[in-house]
Amino acid sequence: MRSASHETLVAYLREHGESHTLKALRLSLLSQGYAATAVEAACRSYLAENPKTYEEILTVRWSIRIFSLAVLAVVALLGLGVLLVGGCTDGYVRIMNGAVDHFNGDMKVALNLYFVLLVVFAGIVATVWYATGPRRPRKGS
């Protein structure tokens, strides 16, 4: 078995702890031949120093992603509901007044506007999704 000081193992965990799970780091150290007791002691020390592990940060990021998707879904459904209710009410009035062609043009404009807004909101969600993604350190830095 390889031997290393406690501080060396903790330094390894500090260096890679922001981009890998503690479980993966533990397995990596064990597969490199370090003693299981030394690895466990280093993991305990690392957790005492850094109570927020990669797994907890990842959970927060997924919560933000799910929340942004829920907001997009609510906005899309509300927009569709307003479009349909407003279109049906206005359409009924226009049909009764004999202005069917004008109504069809208005509905096309409203649908196009709805889809443009939906694309904008989807872009916002995609930006949030990207911004909350895990960041891997670049090689050489």
Image: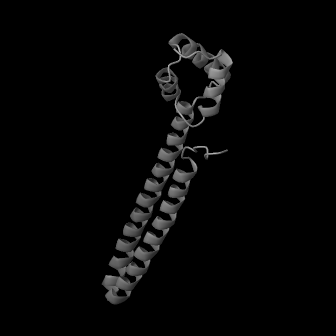
Q: Is residue 125 left or right of residue 94?
A: right
Q: Is residue 102 left or right of residue 119?
A: left
Residue 55 vs residue 23, the one in the foreground: 23
Q: How is the image coloured?
A: one colour
Residue depicted at x 65% and y 16%: 5
Find residue 84 and report its horizontal and vertical position in percent: 37, 68
Find residue 93 and report its horizontal and vertical position in percent: 36, 79
Q: Is residue 120 above or below residue 110?
A: above
Residue 57 vs residue 79, the one in the foreground: 57
Q: Is residue 64 left or right of residue 95?
A: right
Residue depicted at x 38% and y 88%: 102
Residue depicted at x 41% and y 82%: 106
Q: How many labels sit on residues? A: 0
- State the image quarter where residue 100 is shown: bottom left
Q: Is residue 74 above or below residue 113?
A: above
Residue depicted at x 54% and y 59%: 124
Find residue 109 and report its horizontal and vertical position in percent: 43, 80
- State the image quarter where residue 57 is shown: top right
Looking at the figure, which quarter contains the C terminus? top right
Find residue 107 and report its horizontal and vertical position in percent: 38, 79
Residue 98 vs residue 55, the one in the foreground: 55
Residue 43 vs residue 4, the one in the foreground: 4
